[in-house]
Image (tube, rainbow, N blue to C red):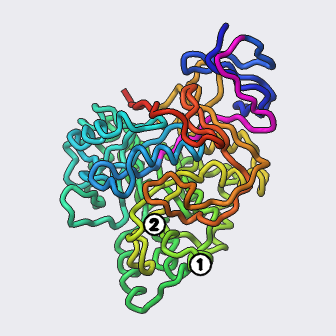
Amino acid sequence: MAFDLVIKGGNVVLRDGVYKVDIGIKDEKISCIAEQINDEAKEVIDASGQYVMPGMIDTHVHISEPGRTEWEGFETGSKALAAGGTTSYVEMPLNALPATINKDALDLKLEAAKTQNYVDYAFYGGLVPENLDKLEELADAGVLAFKCFMSDITSDIPGDFTNVDDYTLYKGMQKLAELDQLLCIHAENPSVTSGLAKEFAKAGKNSGVEYAESRPVFTEVDAVQRAILFAKETGCKLHLVHISTSEAVQVIQKAKQEGVDVTVESCPHYFAFTAEEVDEIGPRAKCQPPIRPAKIQAKLWDELLDGNIDWITSDHSPCTEDLKQGNLWEAWGGISGAQNNVDLMFDLAVKQRGLAVNKFVDLIATHPAARFNLPHKGEIAVSKDADIILVDPNQSYTVKREDLYYKNKHSAYEGRKIDCRVTKTIVRGNVVFDLEKGIVGGPVGKLMTAK
């Protein structure tokens, strides 16, 4: 057989371990895995000394096009994802304008995205108080899942996203259960966090630790408990996004043991930073839930290493640099992180803490592919999409602003040394990023739908 591409000599991460094998790719699919492939190939990549693994599936990305394209667009956002080792992503129903809460808004995104993406992509639909009658049309249009906020996200801008009340959450869950749709929830108690934020800001409590104290652990746990209670009542499939505390993870673990269909994600920034470090980084490290103090972070690491967190996402939430000015109460909350997921977490979890490489692949690819019903992705196996990344565990680099592909080149990771590096990203057999060449070729990303 003549292959389009052969990857030779690498340490290939398969479901049950790491093997020194070659991979043959034909017509965008993995067509052969063997100890040695000597057949003719249009292109051969030497992966000696590197890990070869499925590309990351990032299920939590905010691209602000259309409406706030000056924050981030599909072209720049997907280039950053590709450079960071992500081969497909699911885009949140905010911060674009209008928010993706009906088919008309989804169509605007579909049109904007179709010729700009360097990696494969899909969309969420939103659940807000005014769109209970629009959920079915979004499901029929092929969104992969739905998203809502139990935290405070009020806006006076027409078409912007808003948080749910308990009635909307209950009725929305009922409807999504009927439609067999997954609901992803940002879980924080909005009444307590909003009240404490006003109190702390008035008192001039502006430190990273004080910001974390304004969104205490119990506010996350309380919202998670209510979401699970509603899921039990309605039968809705549930996923809790960017969980930041061990206490919340334990509530979710207990619910799983009781038969609730629930999964949980966290993000690299909750493992890379502590609240004590936020003052030095500044508002670039502001996010919700907040970066936690070191003692709380240590317990979250235990949950990850024990296998109690299902997968990792970036929660890439960019904005223009002026919105990151001021103190932690005034600045926009969101971390630009899409370009530093795989390398950072590989360094922190695999190299520094001994997580098995195949378990790492579960965190970035296998588990999200299964939960989001992407049967052709998430694993290096014959007949799967050839979504593959090469990771060199022996390279180190420092994150520099000029190397970022974001539309707004700022990140909480600027100046951080990472002892690992993504050297190639391949989307369905197409090399889209090469460490020496940068972004390669034009946009090859395709829409992934639930249909």
> At which x and y percent is residue 323?
38, 70
Compute the Cα span from label 1 to label 2. Answer: 18 Å
> At which x and y percent is residue 259?
52, 43
> At which x and y percent is residue 356?
76, 44
Residue at the spot x=25%, y=41% of the render?
Answer: 108
- Which residues make up the magenta segment? 40-59
Q: Pick whichever of labels 1 and 2 is earlier in the sequence.
A: 1
- Main structural element of the magenta stretch: helix, strand or loop? strand
Residue at the spot x=57%, y=45% of the render?
Answer: 83
- What residue type is disc 2 on? Gln
Q: In this orientation, does residue 382 appear?
A: no
Count the marks.
2
Q: Which quadrant of the view contains residue 11? A: top right
Tag 2 residue: 288
| Mark identifier at residue 280 | 1
- What residue type is disc 1 on? Glu
